[in-house]
Image (cartoon, coloured by chain):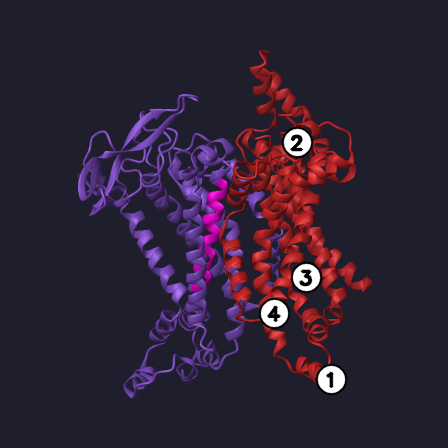
Chain colours: A purple, B red
């Protein structure tokens, strides 16, 4: 414990120093983590994103499946605060539909006479709030029948990309988290057995991990995912896809756990527990696992982006989740060819969401790992 | 050294058996079998096939045998006769379909790996020797971005930029006029003008990670006393850095060559689909979509075998560059 205290953030005031010596390990980790700016920003970003995903129906201004025939491929609506040279409550202009005289393609221009102020907690499409009650309150929107606020534009069927993105976040993020949960159970079990017992058990589990690592991931994922029948219930397919992701992803976690076990297997406190007559199971679960929780959490955080990228790639190729399920990978299917990207670049926005989320998980994981290392600076 | 290579080659055998089992498992996964699919195809073509005929066909192809016998027949055909089975979709032997495209996949993977190294080693060394300089920060940002951007997204964006702002046609490996033309100097130039996008896409992801590894390794080594000794002997910075710490720092680098190969093959699949390259990726995807499982399974088998060989090569390289490993 003294090691940790010495390397913890330098405290200036005597009172703070007092705190430092009596602080619990988790408090110390939190103090160190707090100094990591990027990790803190990522934590906030992910917290907000998760909230948006959980309350997707409320946050999204429109129904993700609501087709709008007269508003296909409309560009993102700009939120403005200056109207006629004067400051104004945030608003959007209505859109006027025009046709290009040469190509006959529909174009949209701002209608500067139609000012639509953004209203908060406005009533819109009906939805069921977690199956508890029916409501029509949305976080934001505009009060107009004809005009809409499409923060990220619309797709080929006139569906609001922002609403779909928010609903997709729910599927993509939860797929990542559930996948990691599966991988965690597998990796923790096999990794701890491997690291604790050593010998031939360790050797054979190591071999198994090497075998799995030697197969190229994406082709293997594709092979397993393609075998799922098209006709199955989308929710069931979703669970199976996360299982498939986990089936290959657990090796990294098992490596981390095994390495940690090797490192602390011969520590004095383990020997003490053994001399006191504790069972093997008790030694592993009560003494060794708690001492490496922080490392495991960091490794878990770093494993999430891999799962998210895997889900996105599979769905993008049409082998993972399929419409009508909305996930970021499914959304990116619309942006598969050059024609639609050059016509409607905003269809790539789910890709940006993937990049930001993956980066945030990486920064968060790095921050956690640094904070959890008692010998770090 | 020879003993070491033989030992490692021996250890590759169980891995090869394992990957072949996985590939066979994938072939067997979808409901129904080869005959079900074949008969469905015949019926679609308007032919009349009775259940008895279907059963006879199944009997003659040995599909009623125990699974282990079927596996043995499949793998022995591949190993002893190079026969990968028949592709339903293409109505051609799987072998010819694969070899046509595998060469290009290997070429692109190898080129992007060399490119990855050409970026990662100098940049990693620079970042470590000039820690916390402007360029170090710049490369760090690049490293994180490269890790976060999925391959296919980068391919899409590059394709879009090339198409919309640089007025070049992208996708595929040749412009239409060179597609069937005999090899010439112009055709090679044309090939290169198309090849840079997949190589950049594949190399970015790999380089991003390797720069971080190289930088961390170098930082560990630069603080060691032997580096100081070398400086004290009056050697120039370039001599010190490139002759001593770089050689040590390269070790973990070489040992990850084996992992780089599966990553490259994986990345290649998606990138090639997006960029419409005539490599293994799109064919594998199509095979999987059509549940043309002999083709798909063989692809996965061959890609995995190349990975195992790659790992073997990287082990041998590692032993060659570091005597401590050879004699351990």
Q: Is residue A356 visible?
A: yes
* Spatial CA span between label 1 and label 4: 23 Å
B324 and A68: which one is in front?
A68
Mark 2, residue position: B175
Q: Position of residue B72 (x, y in %)?
A: 69, 39
Q: Residues within 10 Å of mark 2 (few under 14, many from 20)?
A: some
Q: Is residue B34 magenta?
A: no
What range is drawn magenta here? A298-314
Q: Is residue A158 visible?
A: no
The chain letter for the residue carrying disc 2 is: B
Mark 4, residue position: B217
SS at badge 4? helix
What residue lies at 57% left-to-right and 47% top-to-bottom? A217
Mark 3, residue position: B254
* Quarter the N terminus of chain B occupies: bottom right
Mark 1, residue position: B233
Sequence-earlier tag: 1 or 2: 2
* Spatial CA span between label 2 and label 3: 37 Å
What residue lies at 65% left-to-right and 69% top-to-bottom? B249
Is residue B56 found left or right of A348 in the rendered image?
right
Label 3 or label 4, whichever lies nearer to me, is: 4
* Spatial CA span between label 3 and label 4: 12 Å
Q: Residues within 10 Å of mark 3 (few under 14, many from 20)?
A: many
Q: Position of residue B247 (x, y in %)?
A: 70, 69
Q: Residues within 10 Å of mark 4 (few under 14, many from 20)?
A: many
Label 2 or label 3, whichever lies nearer to me, is: 2
Q: Are marks 3 and 1 on the same chain?
A: yes
Q: Is residue A307 magenta?
A: yes
Sequence-earlier tag: 1 or 4: 4
- Res A218 quadrant in image: top right
A195 and A98: which one is in front?
A98
Sequence-earlier tag: 2 or 3: 2
């Amino acid at each position: 414990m003294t090691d940790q205290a010495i390397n913890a953030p330098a405290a200036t005031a005597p009172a703070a120093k007092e705190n430092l010596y009596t602080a619990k390990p988790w408090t110390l980790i939190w103090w160190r983590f707090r100094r990591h700016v990027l990790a803190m920003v990522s934590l906030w970003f992910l917290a907000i994103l998760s909230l948006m995903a959980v309350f997707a129906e409320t946050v999204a201004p429109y129904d993700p499946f609501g087709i709008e025939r007269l508003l296909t491929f409309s560009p993102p609506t700009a939120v403005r605060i200056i109207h006629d040279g004067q400051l104004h409550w945030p608003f959007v202009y209505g859109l006027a539909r025009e046709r290009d005289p040469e190509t006959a393609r529909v174009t949209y221009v701002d209608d500067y006479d139609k000012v639509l102020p953004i209203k908060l907690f406005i009533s819109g499409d009906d939805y069921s709030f977690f199956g508890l009650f029916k409501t029509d309150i949305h976080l934001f929107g505009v009060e107009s029948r004809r005009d809409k606020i499409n923060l990220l534009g619309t797709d080929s069927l006139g569906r609001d990309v922002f609403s779909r993105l928010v609903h997709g976040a729910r599927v993509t993020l939860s797929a990542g988290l559930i996948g990691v949960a599966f991988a965690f159970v597998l990796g923790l079990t096999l990794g701890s057995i491997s690291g604790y017992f050593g010998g031939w058990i360790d050797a054979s589990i190591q071999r198994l991990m090497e075998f799995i690592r030697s197969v190229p991931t994406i082709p293997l994922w594709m092979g397993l995912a393609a075998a799922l029948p098209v006709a199955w219930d989308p929710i069931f397919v979703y669970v199976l896809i996360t299982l498939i992701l986990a089936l290959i992803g657990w090796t990294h976690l098992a490596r981390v756990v095994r390495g940690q076990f090797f490192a602390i297997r011969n520590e004095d406190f383990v020997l003490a527990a053994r001399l006191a007559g504790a069972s093997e199971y008790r030694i592993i679960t009560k003494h060794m696992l708690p001492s490496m929780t922080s490392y495991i959490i960091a490794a878990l955080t770093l494993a999430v982006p891999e799962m998210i990228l895997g889900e996105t790639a599979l769905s993008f190729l049409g082998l993972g989740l399929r419409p009508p399920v909305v996930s970021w990978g499914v959304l990116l299917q619309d942006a598969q060819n050059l024609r639609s990207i050059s016509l409607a670049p905003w269809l790539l926005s789910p890709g940006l969401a993937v990049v930001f989320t993956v980066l945030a998980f990486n920064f968060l994981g790095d921050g956690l790992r640094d904070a959890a290392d008692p010998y770090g600076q | 050294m020879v003993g070491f290579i033989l030992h490692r080659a021996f250890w590759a055998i169980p891995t090869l058996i394992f990957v072949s089992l996985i590939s066979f498992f994938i072939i067997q996964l979808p409901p129904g079998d080869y005959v079900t699919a074949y008969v469905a195809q015949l019926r679609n073509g308007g032919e009349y096939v009775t259940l008895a005929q279907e059963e006879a066909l199944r009997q003659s192809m040995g599909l009623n045998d125990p699974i282990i016998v079927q596996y043995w027949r499949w793998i022995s055909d591949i190993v002893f006769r190079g026969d990968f089975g028949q592709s339903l979709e293409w109505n051609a032997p799987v072998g010819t379909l694969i070899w046509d495209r595998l060469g290009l996949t290997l070429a692109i993977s190898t080129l992007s790996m060399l490119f990855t190294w050409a970026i990662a080693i100098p940049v990693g060394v620079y970042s470590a020797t000039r820690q916390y300089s402007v360029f170090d920060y710049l490369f760090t940002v690049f490293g994180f971005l490269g890790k976060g951007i999925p391959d296919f997204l980068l391919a899409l964006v590059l394709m879009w930029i090339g198409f919309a702002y640089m007025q070049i046609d992208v996708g595929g490996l040749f412009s239409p006029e060179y597609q069937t033309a005999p090899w010439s100097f112009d055709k090679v130039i044309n090939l290169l003008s198309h090849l840079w996008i997949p190589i950049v896409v594949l190399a970015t992801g790999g380089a991003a990670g390797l720069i971080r590894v190289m930088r961390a390794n170098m930082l560990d080594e630069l603080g060691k006393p032997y580096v100081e000794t070398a400086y004290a002997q009056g050697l120039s910075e370039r001599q010190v850095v490139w002759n001593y710490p770089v050689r040590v720092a390269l070790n973990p680098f070489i040992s990850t060559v084996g992992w780089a190969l599966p990553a490259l093959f994986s990345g290649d699949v998606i990138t090639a689909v997006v960029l419409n390259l005539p490599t293994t990726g799109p064919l594998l995807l199509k095979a999987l979509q059509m549940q043309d499982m002999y083709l798909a399974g063989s692809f996965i088998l061959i890609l995995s075998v190349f990975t195992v060989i790659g790992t073997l090569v990287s082990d041998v390289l590692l032993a060659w560059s570091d005597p401590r490993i050879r004699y351990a």
